[in-house]
Image: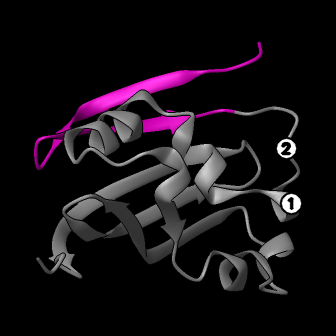
Amino acid sequence: MDKLLLVYPFFFGFKIDVVFLPNHKPIAMNIKELLLNGQSFLALLKEFAIEAKDVIIQDENVLLTDQNLAQREILKQSICIEGKNESGIFNFFGTLHCNLLNKLAVFEMQGFERVGLPTN
């Protein structure tokens, strides 16, 4: 089985995806890559007219370089995802749930803010 995609009920108007990627090692996992494999996360970006290349997972490298990460099966962390478009910068706040053993990732969006408004 190459990929397993489960879609959970809507959460604040957006679906939550679980994505299984069998060839990724937990310590080398890329959170952005996992989230971009979920159709609901892509729909969220489309809703805000944000391209995938303009998405940054804040402190992703800090999360992935945690020395205790290899000893954990489950990672649950509050994160901020920054996305840019023509009308400004959006910060999406929520909780990232990762099952490192099974390479599953879920982002629960709890809210967002618009910052960096363009000046005319």
Q: Is residue 32 left or right of residue 3?
A: left
Judged from this view, the residue extending furthest toward the front is 120
- What x and y, as percent, mark residue 45? 33, 44
The amino acid type, in three-letter code, at marker 1 is Ala
Q: Is residue 105 left or right of residue 24?
A: left
- What x and y, as percent, mark residue 83? 38, 63
Residues shaded magenta:
1-20
CB under 8 Å between discs 2 and 1: yes
**Taking 63 as reference, is 98 above or below it?**
above
The amino acid type, in three-letter code, at marker 2 is His
54 or 24, which is in the foreground? 54
Q: In the rendered image, which residue does mark 1 sit on?
A: 28
**Taking 78 as reference, is 33 above or below it?**
above
Residue 114 lies in quadrant? bottom left
Q: Which label was assigned to residue 24? A: 2
| Disc 2 from disc 1: Cα separation | 7 Å
